[in-house]
Image: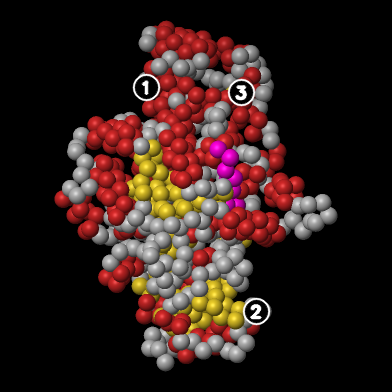
Amino acid sequence: MSDSRAAILGRILQALGHAARADAPDVLQRVNGHARGPQPQWAEADRERFLAKLAKAAGTHATIASHAGIVHAVTDYLAAQYLPQRVCVAPHPLLADIVWPEGWQVESRRARGDDRIGFAVAFCGIAETGSLMLLSGPESPTSLNFLPDDFLCLLPEDRIVPRMEDAWALLRAERGSLPRATNIITGPSRTADVEQTIQLGAHGPRRLHVLLMESAAQA
Amino acid sequence: MKPTSHAFSDNARRALNDATLQQALAKAGVGFVDKRRAALSELPEFDALREAGRAIKDHTLANLDHYLLRFEQQLVTSGGQLHWADTPDEACAAVLDICRKAGARMVAKGKSMVGEEIAVNDALEAAGLEVVETDLGEYIIQVAHEPPSHIIAPAVHKTRAQIARLFEDLHHQPGLTRPLETVPQIVDEARQVLREKFLAADVGITGANFLIAETGSTVIVTNEGNGDLSATLPRVHIVLASIEKVVPNLEDASVLLRLLARSATGQEITSYTTFFTGPRRRADADGPEQFHVVLVDNGRSRMLGGAFHEMLRCIRCGACLNHCPVYSAVGGHAYGWVYPGPMGAVLTPLMVGLDEGRPLPNASTLCGRCEEVCPMSIPLPKLLRELRRQEFARGLHPPRSRWALAAWAFFARRPQLYRWATRLGTRLLNRLSGGRGRFRSLPFAQAWTTARDLPAPQGDTFMAQWQRRKQP
């Protein structure tokens, strides 16, 4: 394979006429400059934009005043969808101290093939497209975002950023580097592979429900 | 797959006479075009983004070696492994080697056009592995034993009834039938069948829409979530990517993502846009233990800096297919290889050879709609014309068209004779038409007259009229 590497790079060198280095100063400057392209603009507040775009992508939401409202919001959602009270919850600090109702089956782990409901916490929300950004890690197993039929996601309101570029800035500031998987999720899973007809719930979640938390303060 | 591009004329004739295919194509074309138009009308910044996107690609291609090396360095730093592959054979060998070392038996595959290009499924199956396509469209054509007919909607040529019959035959035991008619029933059926495959697979293979030099990440966009399941659940994740997919940083990818989804499906963003960076980390609860990127050249470095350099800007959105009058009439299979439509008519001759792909650059009216809608402003008609030029220079035209052109050139270089001949021809044809102004049939022109009338020349030649009108 190293022969192929030399052959490919050799042809590129010949075509472009310069000697390649991964740490050439202008390459580093371009890569680390993080210059933004044209930024789409909108008139409404970021929160309104986020919710409008989420709804457009067939996502739903409930607003909760604080951390104390989580159980109530989840209960309402399960009742409205006629779902069993069996939830797979991400091992996230924001979800750790919740006292779930008596009789509920709540497990904190990665998802399995037969999990019906998953519940995780978004790293941030992106107003431009109504998207959630989730970062894989011990607190956020990626399988939870994709395997369960219903995906519930907690998003503190002050974590809504305007655009994808703002999410990258936040990620660099808070985490330094990218996790194994950075998922930008916009609405539930869908397909149009049968006669161009949009059908939700292809392989990933059939429904996506955001719990928008107005105050980040934990009770 | 063995290309049949040389037989485009026969392929196209068959496609035009296939009533079911025509029904499917009629349904698909308008949908894509309308959705894209609606999405663009909601984003006044689209043209500015298009300019910026083109500049990003131009800059990256002009420094491609730098960015590939930076990507390699960052990928290795994050624990991933890079495999350079000059040819499809080398790429398949690399994938096979990874699967063997992992003791793999089943592979779950997300959609990858590079995978189609290198025919990785054939290689894996020949080595005794089970390969399951997990994108619904790809799954449909895999079980139908057909190649994709569109780069983003591989089963766009299939009707609902055909898919239902296919699933019925494949999944259902006698006496154990679930209803299978509506779109939700078909999608649900595939969801149930494929869910078991995701959970059982040892290796997941996905494509890559972009590679990020800054972080060593690979990016995929999907709507179904199948790519993410393929990349998350199996022990090993292999990414198939080609060298022109690299961009400098996350901000650059953000510009291109805004262009890609709108141009492809008319969405502002797909349901899932995922950046993979290395294998599972020490404390992670899930994710693959190994992360491999197979970086395929397959003729691309030879396009760099040459007449087809601009084709390397392509982000595989499919807009040129959706807006092409030829593609819309004959569908993707007529093109006879992996990439159809205008972008395929450029790429196929470059990848499988001009001898094989010769008819494709000629199967175009050069109407220019493809260039108009291309988010990367690739001058596709110019590139098609260049292929025609090369074809002629290499003497690959069929003898009949060579003789006809030689005859025309003989006259065209002798203006007096040319005028005399056209005058004679005009009068002759006018007389032959018997004053009806059109021909229902004409010797040597049946190809035209079987489907429509040929208009007969009316009055004088252009040159004669020009001479007359110049007089005061």
Residue that label 3 marks? B448
Residue that label 2 marks? A84
Count of picture labels: 3
A153, above or below B299, in the image: below
> Foreground residue, B88 or B418?
B88
In the displayed structure image, the side of residue A194 where residue B116 appears, left or right: left
Q: Chain of mark 2?
A: A
* Residue A20 in sight in this render: yes
A218, above or below B224, in the image: below
In 3D space, how far apart are the residues under numbered discs 3 and 2 (Cα atoms)?
Answer: 67 Å
Taking the spot 57% from the left edge, 43% from the top edge, the residue there is B129
Check the image and name the residue furthest to the right.
Answer: B175
Badge 3 crowding class, 10 Å Cα cut-off, few under 14, some 14 to 19, many 20 or more, is few
Quarter containing the N terminus of chain A: top left
Question: Which of the labelled discs sits on residue B187, or is there none?
Answer: none
Residue that label 1 marks? B470
Looking at the rendering, the stretch of residues picked out in magenta corresponds to: B127-137
| Three-letter code, disc 3 | Trp
In 3D space, how far apart are the residues under numbered discs 1 and 2 (Cα atoms)?
Answer: 88 Å
